[in-house]
Image: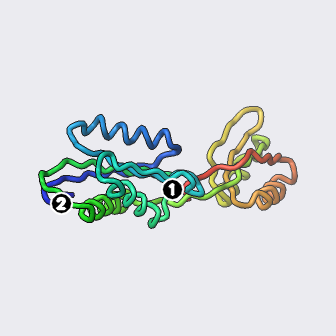
Amino acid sequence: MEVKRSRFLAVAERVADESAAREVVASARRRHHDARHHCSAFVIGPDAAIRRSNDDGEPAGTAGAPMLEVLTRHGVSDVVVVVTRWFGGTLLGAGGLVRAYGDATRLALEAAGTRERRLVHTMLVTADIAEAGAIEHRLRGLGAVTDVAYGRRVVITVGVADPERLAAEVAAISGGRADVEDAGTAWVDA
């Protein structure tokens, strides 16, 4: 976008942690080394506990803070936004900068779209090869099957919201011959 001949390029990327967010910022600096500012904001974690912003040479509070405010208002997490600015020769003033960086961030989020994530229990279902097909078919209806490993027995990895329901279903399908093991939790795209 352009405001009084200054050009703003916003990039929004999904990141898993703070170091990945900082790498996105560093990459923008390398890619657009001719720009004067690479302002950034990121929110990370399922509880959005990690929140950082950087004005990168713009007057304090005129770039990173409004960008972080847009991320917060949209309720997103695990995302970094970098807004690169090429100065156009006209000073925008504090209000103009706040609007420009906030608008660029909002446009980047709208263009990228959002995806909901949910916490699931990762379960390992171990069954005999003869029963594995029927069990896998039923499990795909209950949750997200993420892996099927064939060996002497078949191990099906599935993410579910309700591990007790999964155990009951597997017991009913297999007549109690398949094993169900809790392998922890994971965040998955809904």
Q: Which residue is mark 1?
A: 77
Q: Amino acid at mark 1?
A: Ser
Residue located at (74% from left, 61% from top):
162
Query: Residue 84 location in percent, x, y?
Result: 27, 48
**Which picture quadrant has residue 69?**
bottom left
Q: Amino acid at mark 2?
A: Val
The residue lying toward the viewer, choosing from 2 and 4, is 4
The residue lying toward the viewer, choosing from 11 and 102, is 102
Query: Residue 96 location in percent, x, y?
Result: 24, 63
Describe residue 9's horizontal placement relative to residue 60 as left or right: left
The residue lying toward the viewer, choosing from 17 and 88, is 88
**Which picture quadrant has residue 151?**
top right
**Local secondary structure at mark 1:** loop
Q: Which residue is mark 2?
A: 3
Q: Residues within 10 Å of mark 1 (few under 14, many from 20)?
A: many
Most distant residue in the front direction: 60
Residue located at (31% from left, 61% from top):
107
Which of the two discs, 2 and 1, labels the residue nearer the N terminus?
Answer: 2
Q: Quadrant of the C terminus?
A: bottom right
Above or below: residue 106 compared with residue 78: below
Describe residue 6's horizontal placement relative to residue 18 as left or right: left
